[in-house]
Amino acid sequence: MKKKLVVLTGAGISAESGISTFRDANGLWKNHDIMEVASIDGYQRNPKLVQEFYNERRKQLFEVEPNAAHFFLKDLEHNFEVAIITQNVDDLHERAGSSKVIHLHGELRKARSEKDEKLIIDWNKDIKLGDLAEDGNQLRPHIVWFGEMVPEIENAIDEVLTADVLVIIGTSMQVYPAASLKDYAKPNVPIIYVDPSDTYTDSSITHIKKRATESIEELKTILNIF
Ligand code: APR
């Protein structure tokens, strides 16, 4: 019986694939505050600007590739039952071959009805005003915006509750409820945090102060696989 490894990832794991993180660019996009383009209020105020923000990020997906860290997590499936819980909306974990990926904040390559959050379709093009869902309402990105509920959080908590080891890679641990997931790990479950910065510190967890791709050898040692 394989041990269960749960991995919580954030923007940092995709940074080495060329996708900029949220808080490294001091939270700006073309001088727009993230809250203007990644919140339900921002969308209601200026839907065109928000659609453009996600259209640009969706287009970028076709220019980037998974990096060694994404592939390492897929390879861990030989040694562990792996569940990935990501805050990222890119598809790099899937493209690296990981078989279980929970997207807490949605997915760039999906769209949904403005009025029905369950009416979700695959969508790889720009979303334009006038692109409608089956229910006749405007399509919007299938992204969980600031101010919206996180439908997948219960599934994510269930995964962490049954983890034998928890690895956290590339997140500043500033956004909830994602940042609270580590608190659901059973006592004595080892928690390893991979991040080159000291933005987040917690004396109860092991901090590998390296970029994701540089942490692989140390992670292998800690996870006892060779
Ligand atoms: N390898 C590992 N970590 C890295 C790397 C790297 N190569 N480069 C940067 N990092 C770290 C940064 O030090 C930072 O702590 O990744 C973290 C990225 O943090 P954020 O930019 O805050 O991204 P994230 O934590 O994923 O943001 C959470 O906030 O904006 C919302 O919904 C959005 O999902 C996002 C959420």
Image: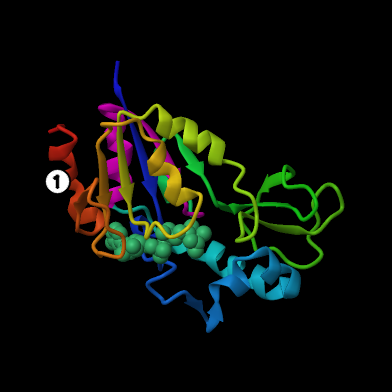
Task: Estimate the x, y position of residue 35 in percent, counting from the top left.
Answer: 58, 71
At 19% from the left and 58% from the top, the residue drawn is 209
Pick whichever, 206 or 28, lies toward us. 206
The residue carrying mark 1 has its beta carbon less than 8 Å from ligand 1: no
SS at mark 1 in the image: helix
Q: Can the viewer see residue 16 in this picture?
A: no
Is 10 a magenta residue? no
Quarter of the image for the C terminus: give it: top left
* Quadrant in which the N terminus is drawn: top left
Instruction: Please state which of residues 28 and 78 is positioned toward the viewer in this rendering.
Output: 28
Magenta stretch: includes residue 86: yes
Give the residue displayed 18% in from the left and 55% down from the top. Answer: 214
x%, y% of residue 13? 34, 55
Per the rendered image, the range of residues in magenta is: 68-89
Give the residue drawn at x 42%, y 30%.
161
Crowdedness of circle 1 by 10 Å Cα count: few (<14), some, many (20+)? few
What residue is disc 1 on? 217
- Image-quadrant location for residue 63: bottom left
Residue 209 in the image: above or below residue 81? below
Which residue sits furthest bottom?
31
Q: Percent from the top left, x then y, of residue 158?
A: 48, 30
Count of marks placed on residues = 1
Residue farthest to the right, as pictured:
136
Q: Quadrant of residue 5?
A: top left
Does 193 sit left or right of 174 as displayed? left
Q: Is residue 146 visible in this depiction of the protein?
A: yes
204 in relation to 88, above or below: above
Q: How is the image coloured?
A: rainbow
Q: Is residue 215 left or right of residue 135?
A: left
